[in-house]
Amino acid sequence: MKKIMYSSTNGHPELLDFKEALLRGQAPDKGLYVPDSIPSIPKEELASFSGMEYPEIALCVMRRYLGDLIPEDDLVAILKDAYDFPVPIERVYDEKYVMRLDRGPTFSFKDFAARLMGRLMQYFLKEEGRSMVILTATSGDTGSAVAHAFYGLDNIKVVVLFPEEEVTGRQRKQMTTLGENVTVFAVDGKFDDCQAMVKQAFVDPDFADLNLSSANSINIGRLIPQSIYYFYAWSKVAAKDREIVFSVPCGNFGNVMAGLIAMRMGLPVHKFVIATNENDEFPRFLSTGDYRPISPSVKCISNAMNVGHPSNLARVFWLYEGSMDENGTVVKAPDIEAMRREIFAVCITDSETRAAISDAYNRFDTLLEPHGAVGWAGLARYLKEVEDWSPCVSLETADPAKFPEEVVRAVGLEPPVPESMALLDGMEERFDLVAGEYGSFKEKLSELFRG
Ligand SMILES: *Cc1c(COP(=O)(O)O)cnc(C)c1O
């Protein structure tokens, strides 16, 4: 098997293996790491997926990217441990399905990426006898997925900052009830203040020895694991040579980028529907060829997708032989005709999102939340405006109980609260308050690590 190396989308000449790219996060020229070739999975092997469980399919995908960095027995154990929750694929009607990626510990699809990234980081750090501090600012979902993913792991400490007034009670409790190696600070300020404090800590020479890392969403170690569920879905509803349509609700485009990689690996995909909310910079680009980030981003009810310039677009452009820098400037135009053959992009407004929640529930008894509803509405548009196709899988990226207000508003029903989410209400919280300026945070951080 050829060893895959990783390089920057901005053209930095350095080539790293998976381990180094994972531990580094972002390239020194601010580009994103991409593989120097995309491994393919032969047809016969794909055919064997239909009888496999999730962790087994994960092994077939991941070992191609990891090469010999992790012995197979160790990798099997890591994958079983990371993916120990169900991945339901519900039939809505005919051969149109919803895949629920919301059954992980924090009830969003971000668990799929974060849990494997955390375990891979721990493995490599242990091997080298190194330790690391993950420092991350969150406006809600990312912080809890990252905190849970690294919770209880040796060699890694996690520090999360969140804006005191801007997260919901449940989101906060998903972080503050963990303890052990997870320390949480509520900041008297906005999300931007949290992010500024994190950035300052990264360049503070007093913390140089702590080995700070951000574990942020552009890490290659978070991207690749997301390819796995596309193979899983196909193997369960299509298999053989049948081509499938996937509909993906998109924000930073990590999810759909992983799907596009799965297709390049040989997965028989007929089309990707890229469904955005009113932040429609990509659907506009695909129709006009002109890319304009949206600033400031539009506030929509699918709030995890309120992104005016998706960071993973740099990777999407790379895949289609173009180039885009970290600010969204198109350095080299991609092959837009090829993009249009493989992608149908559509903008779904908030009122269409609400109508989709209510329609899916009233007609098919399928309960969706705003993000998954954007995907479902996008699929409906494709089937109506382009062609009817089967099989189709639309991705649901969060549990409806995370967004009870919108669900109640659309269908008049309280979404059922999963047991472990309900348990949070009675659990003890632990977090510290800090002012929204670096000095007081630095003091706390020094206390924490220097005793
Ligand atoms: C992060 C997130 C998205 C957007 O995913 P991207 O990979 O950033 O496109 C969609 N839905 C939910 C619930 C999310 O948390």
Image (spheres, helix red, strand yellow):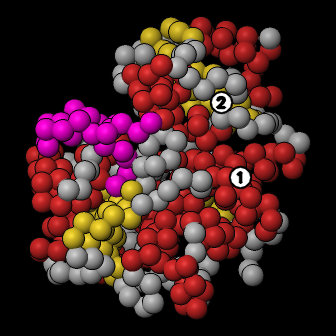
Query: Left or right: where does residue 442 sit relative to residue 328?
Result: right
Residue 416 within the segment the image draws in magenta = yes
Query: Left or right: where does residue 341 sit relative to residue 331?
Result: left
| Mark 1 close to ligand 1, CB under 8 Å | no
369 versus 440 height, above or below: below
Q: Callout 1: 10 Å neighbours few (<14), some, many (20+)?
A: many
Magenta region: 396-419
Q: Which label is found at residue 120?
A: 1
Residue 415 within the segment the image draws in magenta = yes
Q: Callout 2: 10 Å neighbours few (<14), some, many (20+)?
A: many
64 versus 172 height, above or below: below
Look at mark 2 in the image and give the residue it sits on.
158
185 versus 158 height, above or below: above
Q: Secondary structure at mark 2?
A: strand
The residue shown at (71%, 34%) is: 152
Q: Of the residues shown, which amino acid type is indicated by label 2? A: Val
In front: 278, or 10? 278
Using the rendered image of the protein, determine whether residue 350 is visible from the camera's viewpoint.
yes
In front: 54, or 387? 54
